[in-house]
Amino acid sequence: MAIFVIMLVIAGLAAVDTSANPDWSRVSGALTQHDISPDDILWGVNSADNIYIRNGNGWSQVGGALKHVTVGKAGVWGVNAGRSIFYRNGVTLSNPKGSSWTHIPGSLTQIDSGPSGIVYGVNRHHQIYCRTGISLSRPKGTGWVRVPGGLKYVSCGVYGCWGVNSADQIWFRHGVTPSNCAGTKWVRIGGALTQLEVDKEGKVYGVNVHKSLFVRNGVSSSRPTGTTWRHIPSRPFTHISAGYSKIVGLVSSGAIYYYGGDWSIIPGSLKQIDHGLTTAVWGVNRHDAIYRLRTSTWQRIPGALTHVSAGEAGIWGVNKYDYIFYRNGVTENNPSGTSWRHIPGRLKQIDSGPSGIVYGVNVNDQIYCRTGIEYGKPFGTGWRQVTSGGRLKYVSCGVLGCWGVNSANDIWYRSGVTKENCVGANWHHISGKLKQIEVGAAGDVYGINSAGNVYRRTGISELVPLGSGWQKIEDYGSHITTGLNGQYLLVNGRIHYSSGCPRRSP
């Protein structure tokens, strides 16, 4: 009964939003199957059975044609459309591509290169075999031994071999060694997966029928089968592989994604979040409930807002009626404040920037800045329109000026903005298209386009406040903000945090 319950838990996660993790970065190309080595060298085959290797930033085609390729400490092996088996000669650290293929007697549909001396495979009848006689002088081995049982997919690690059968049941093989590759016994593992792979440390990753990704917790030499399955937010993967520092997954289209691990997940769900020139992080959820981040937990703040902004100019917000509010009583000792003050005017979005700078846009995309902000009157005295012809749907201000996007997703920069002259001097059109944009504590600018791609502005400095170009940092996000703490990215409500600029895809 316990096994059945765990199976339901894993198999029943179809409703989980499996795209909600920005750590998955797109790699160029398309594959139908892949495997990544313990040294993070990626091999794969495409729909035409062409073979490719990726060592660093680019793909290199390898001669031959395979349906399935595998790479591990036991070398590079593969099977073709006719179920013939091949071993790659000449593979070394200095020449990971190798030199030629050698045909190996036998017939398999899937093969796995595991630790040194361990190669497993299954045939079209789901019969399991392991390779015997593998040594330094004979890396191809000498023969095949039948392993009891039936599997459709198998993968071997330092603690033993894992596999899934035609019913998606998960099994672990104890006692597998180079001198006794057949091992000693099978143990049923709770859960249901369609495909799995073991990394160099024995950690197991797998995907289920709903294309959800899982990792096995608690795997160790003393407990080789681990303890529980943990879901990893990801794209809807059909195939997964794990190397030294990367996890690589394929989706149905063949698109390739790798896990970089730059972002951590903060519990909770928000539709909008803001962070800026202070350590304050505020957000609102889909019910317009207001929250403030306290270390790693959220504090509920009384009131209802559709948009909130936190900056040196204080905490500001607007509600569903476009009414404007300022948070009273926010201090270092009381960062939550005491009450909301209604501010005359109507805005649909507002931004609290450097001290004395508050910008906002109304339902007609007209732009306004707050005047009269000073000590004793942190909420200011009035609103001033920023050029009668200017139109923006979203605006954000930093120490080097204000940035915004209009209804056509054109990007604009406002120079000359100061506390004394909040309207600034000139608009500068910036190349590119974004639907949302945010400016951080150091003048850094991040934005998201209509496809959900996340970008960072490069080349920004005091001498060049407009920057020089756009750098794509993530494939998908719904809202981003940046500030003293780092970046916070929302992906369909999920909250992700990075303490620094995320690295680019390789």
Image: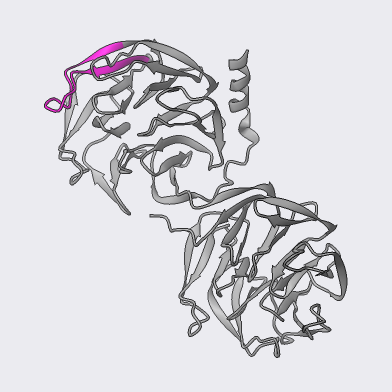
Question: Residue at (51%, 54%) from the top-left corner?
Answer: 475
- Picture colour scheme: one colour
**Closer-to-camera residue (219/265):** 219
Up-down relation of residue 164 to residue 314 (above or below) = above
- Choose top left, top right, bottom left or bottom right for residue 18: top right
Residue 150 seen in this snapshot: yes
Instruction: Report x, y in % for residue 168.
Output: 50, 20
Asked if residue 2 lies in the magenta stretch, the reply is: no
Snapshot quadrant of residue 88? top left
Quarter containing the C terminus? bottom left
Q: Is residue 336 above or below residue 61?
A: below
Quadrant, the N terminus: top right
Of the pair 191 and 399, the residue shown nearer to us: 399
Would residue 280 appear left or right of 10 to someone viewing this image? right
In percent of the image, x 48 and y 83: which residue is there? 464
The location of residue 125, given as percent across then percent down, is 37, 13
Q: Give the x, y percent position of residue 149.
A: 39, 10
Q: Is residue 87 above or below residue 142?
A: below
The front one of 476 and 313 is: 313
The magenta-colored residue range is 127-146
**Height in image: 298 above or below 104?**
below
Residue at x 39% of width, y 10% of height: 185
Provide residue 192's location: percent of width, then percent of height.
Answer: 54, 23
Q: Residue at x 30, y 42 (%)?
A: 39
Q: Is residue 141 magenta?
A: yes
Can you tell which quarter of the image residue 122 is in? Answer: top left
